[in-house]
Amino acid sequence: MTDTKKSATLSLNGESYELPIFSPTAGPDVLDIRKLYAQAGVFTYDPGFTSTASCDSTITFIDGNKGELLHRGYPIDQLAGKSHYLEVCYLLLYGELPTATQLEDFEGRVTRHTMVHEQMHNFFRGFRRDAHPMATLVGVVGAMSAFYHDSTDISDPWQREVASIRLIAKLPTIAAMAYKYSIGQPFVYPRNDLDYAANFLHMCFSVPAEDYNVNPILARAMDRIFTLHADHEQNASTSTVRLASSSGANPFACVAAGIACLWGPAHGGANQACLEMLKEIGTVDRIPEFIARAKDKNDPFRLMGFGHRVYKNTDPRATVLKQSADEVLELLGIEDNPLLQVAKELEQTALHDPYFIDKKLFPNVDFYSGIILEAMGFPTSMFTPIFTVARTVGWVSQWKEMIADPQNKIGRPRQLYLGETTRNYTDIENR
């Protein structure tokens, strides 16, 4: 951030206080209130922290009004269209696009770390077969600090680097193992001859009894899903990772905390909620009924997968993923899948209905990712674990940035206390 020597004056109880103003490279100016409590004896009230910057960062910038998402300054549509997930991982982690040599080295390091400790197989078997894969992920990732305790010293830059690579490399393997365990199939080891996305699909869908060849269109679609979900600024799960790491917790514990937060239906479960809505609609002929309900202010029904809390115009990620959704549906067909038929018809209705156009309720990234994952054959319970795999690099990048920040201090939000004031204890016989 740049100090522009600007300031704002706060008048309180006859006193005036100067609050410095910082100007970012993009986005609105920021009032610095760090000394407000010490100087004026008051602090601000901001539930949800929607008007509060908890850190400064150089990783991701979002302009919701413009429908803009930048990673290190690069527009997401360019990265998703011309790059691939591991190159975007390198960009997020190190700040610049890699040279060919740097990328080859990075991909090699990730590939060589995709296997998990063999004893972790036994750890999985402690879970019930019907456990939600996200519950399994929270437990297994949290336990990584017990299996890889040689990379938990956050004061050592090399251990931070090793932990970063391990998390990015092993999350697809762990997520695939959680899926296989939930359906009673044997674990599939990673293959070094496959790229990141293809390897994940192979670990999820191959079985020892026959060969499984990953279709390049599906691998490309999965790579785009990973790329488009890699980071999204200071959202709830990223803020959770940062808050956990501010205490000095090891990176595996911090990412496990982020996974637990992502599991919430208001955060990472949006594409699952979208598919459940499509199931509720059921058939194409019922779409007008649900469109009418969505327009009715007195009806609690909401169209999931349309519009976005941050993007007030179009979701730039949705524009890119629509192309992959069209390619996947053309490849796999939708004739035998009523759910996908409803999705395609609903998309066309929303894109041409004046009500949705006026309110900018366009299909978002969750709508298209849900369609793609459903078409690929993933159950809805795997949608959020796949989101987890993609977002891991964002969490790790934000964690590394925070650890290296000289202004880093343990998080300690304030509160507006509305409870009882001091009361004297009453003996139980007198209550």
Image: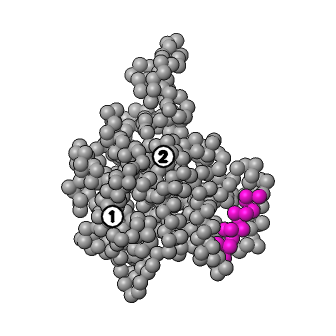
What amino acid does circle 2 point to? His
Question: Which residue sits furthest top?
Answer: 14
- What SS does tag 2 mark? strand
Is residue 257 visible to us here? Answer: no
Q: For the N terminus, which image quadrant?
A: top left
Q: Are marks 1 and 2 in contact (CB under 8 Å)?
A: no
- Label 1 environment density (alpha carbons within 10 Å; few <14, some 14–19, many ≥20): many
Residue 291, placed above or below residue 283: above
Label for residue 111? 1
Q: Earlier in the sequence, mark 1 or mark 2?
A: 2
Question: Which residue sits furthest left?
Answer: 150
Residue 162, placed above or below residue 28: below
At x 37%, y 62%, the residue is 171
> Position of 244 compared to 78: left or right?
left
- Label 2 environment density (alpha carbons within 10 Å; few <14, some 14–19, many ≥20): many
In the rendered image, residue 342 lying in the magenta stretch gets the answer yes
Q: Nearer the viewer, residue 424 or 204?
A: 204
Q: Residue 134: give x, y in percent of width and height.
A: 42, 64
> Is the magenta region chiefly helix, strand or loop?
helix
Residues in magenta, as a range: 338-352
Is residue 87 visible to us here? Answer: yes
What amino acid does circle 1 point to? Thr
What coloring was used for the rendering? one colour
